[in-house]
Image (cartoon, rainbow, N blue to C red):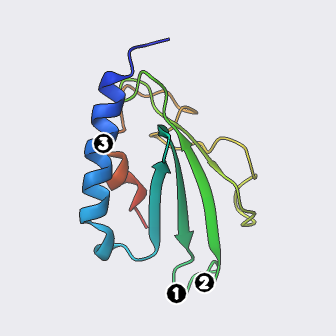
């Protein structure tokens, strides 16, 4: 098991940035578990005019002890017709594609519409 100090420090910084930017992104909410900053849950409200309009989609991000040097696992927990529930999403910033860090600000990456 790696030293999680770096991961905790980075995620604390990301959480502060996410809270500051919350008003700019009303369709997104993300928060770590109270007792585990390495596990986050997020909600995405379907954007107006999209096929997902009116939907609320719940997902999970699991950061390992080696974050930000290894990417997180990201999965959807709500059916949307687009993603398989409970399966890791393949994103350039997730553990599905191991690029040497495309995770330069997970909060920023989550905001992509």
Residue that numbered label 3 is attached to: 12
Is 92 drawn above or below residue 28 in the view shown? above
Image spot of residue 47 (x, y percent): 52, 80
Figure quadrant of residue 61 = top right
Residue that numbered label 2 is attached to: 53
Is 104 drawn above or below residue 81 in the view shown? above
Badge 1: residue crowd in 10 Å (few <14, some 14–19, many ≥20): few
Q: Looking at the image, do the residues carrying marks 2 and 1 touch, with CB atoms under 8 Å apart?
A: yes
Residue that numbered label 1 is attached to: 48
First in sequence: mark 2 or mark 1?
A: 1
- Distance, label 1 to label 3, CA atoms, is 31 Å
- Distance, label 3 to label 2, CA atoms, is 31 Å
Image spot of residue 46 (x, y percent): 57, 77
First in sequence: mark 3 or mark 2?
A: 3
Badge 2: residue crowd in 10 Å (few <14, some 14–19, many ≥20): few
Image side of residue 94 versus residue 58, left or right: left
């Amino acid at each position: 098991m790696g030293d999680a100090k770096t991961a905790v420090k980075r995620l604390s910084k990301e959480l502060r940035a996410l809270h500051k930017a919350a008003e700019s992104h009303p369709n997104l909410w993300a928060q770590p578990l109270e007792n585990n900053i390495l596990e986050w849950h997020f909600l995405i409200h379907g954007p107006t005019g999209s096929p997902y309009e009116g939907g609320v989609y719940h997902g999970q991000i699991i950061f390992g002890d080696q974050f930000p040097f290894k990417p997180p696992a990201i999965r959807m927990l709500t059916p949307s017709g687009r993603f398989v529930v409970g399966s890791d999403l393949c994103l350039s910033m997730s553990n599905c594609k191991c690029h040497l860090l495309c995770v330069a600000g997970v909060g920023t990456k989550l905001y992509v519409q």
